[in-house]
Image (tube, helix red, strand yellow):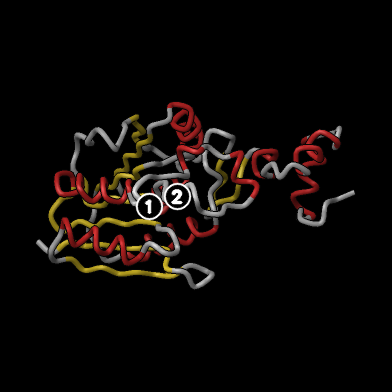
């Protein structure tokens, strides 16, 4: 019998993937993410493979891609880096809809393996590389930096399914601000003149990240946009040179 919290489409996929439906049902009863059982998600008109080595792309991140594409329309940018790329969903979706030269990085070898596979499956040419962004700095300079980094604190409530996702992709120190602070810091070295920094953020982090931005850029145009639930979720930063 189909569980109430599963759509008919997903249930049909599970039945096709698992002739012995008892196997995924036992996992689903323990809040195992259905996306991992199916093996992929539909993300901004793109099929992205997922497994326990990467965070499952959310609707909010789809909206980030959509708003980023609109933001970039009047920018003559040529290069972009996606920091903490995970499954590669942001980089791949942006590459499919722009002519940007895109780099994408992560600390996890297993995440990068899957991201490279996703890029190949979607016929997108992206340069993936491993880096510990908290300790190292990318060698190139970019017109745009985009990131949906870890931003949860360990005290924050998360849905039961989250326990199966990689902790390294979820949690950050300094009240969840660790990666934003670091990326803003290194951006002073790797962001080209007239470039932009784009973040997905936690629902309560807007003011903290604006204050962090002012620590590194005394003058900047800062745009904050909301998600589907009316939470402040995206920040677009354009330092004034």
Could one spot residue 153 in this view of the protein?
Answer: yes
* Mark 1 residue crowding within 10 angstroms, few (<14) / some (14–19) / many (20+): some
Residue drawn at (47%, 69%) of the image: 231
Q: Secondary structure at mark 1?
A: loop
Q: Secondary structure at mark 2?
A: loop
Relative depth, front residue between 153 and 183 = 153
Compared across the picture, whether 74 is left or right of 113 comes to: left
Please state, as top left, top right, bottom left or bottom right, where the C terminus lies in the image.
Answer: bottom left
Does 237 sit above or below residue 55? below
In the picture as drawn, the residue positioned furthest to the left comes out as 241
Spatial CA span between label 1 and label 2 = 6 Å
Q: Quadrant of residue 92?
A: top left
Q: Which mark is residue 235?
A: none
Question: What label sits on residue 153 in the rendered view?
Answer: 2
Residue at (49, 57) in percent of width and height: 62
Q: Position of residue 90 (x, y in %)?
A: 43, 49
12 with respect to 235 (left or right): right
In contact (CB < 8 Å): disc 1 and disc 2: yes
- What's the residue at 40%, 57% (across, down)? 200
Q: Earlier in the sequence, mark 1 or mark 2?
A: 2
Q: Position of residue 145 (x, y in %)?
A: 28, 50
**Number of the label disc, if any, that sits on residue 175:** 1
Q: Quadrant of residue 140?
A: top left
């Amino acid at each position: 019998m189909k569980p109430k919290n599963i759509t008919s489409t997903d249930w049909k996929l599970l039945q096709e993937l698992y002739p012995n439906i008892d196997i995924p049902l036992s996992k689903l009863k323990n809040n195992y993410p259905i996306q991992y059982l199916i093996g992929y998600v539909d993300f901004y008109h793109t099929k992205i493979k997922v497994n326990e080595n990467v965070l499952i792309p959310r609707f909010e991140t789809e909206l980030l891609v959509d708003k980023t594409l609109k933001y970039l329309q009047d920018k003559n940018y040529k290069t972009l880096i996606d920091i903490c790329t995970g499954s590669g969903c942001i980089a791949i979706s942006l590459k499919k809809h722009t002519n940007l030269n895109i780099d994408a990085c992560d600390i996890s070898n297993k995440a990068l393996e899957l991201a490279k596979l996703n890029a190949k499956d979607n016929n997108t040419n992206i340069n993936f590389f491993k880096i510990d962004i908290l300790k190292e700095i990318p060698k190139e300079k970019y017109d745009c930096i985009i990131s949906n980094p870890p931003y949860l604190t360990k005290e924050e409530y998360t849905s039961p399914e989250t326990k199966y996702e990689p902790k390294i992709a979820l949690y950050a120190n300094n009240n969840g601000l660790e990666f934003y602070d670091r990326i803003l810091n290194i951006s002073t070295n790797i962001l080209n003149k007239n470039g932009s920094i784009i973040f997905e953020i936690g629902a309560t982090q807007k003011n903290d990240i604006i204050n962090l931005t002012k620590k590194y850029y005394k003058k900047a145009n800062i745009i904050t946009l909301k998600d589907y639930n009316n939470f402040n979720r995206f920040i677009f930063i354009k330092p004034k040179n």
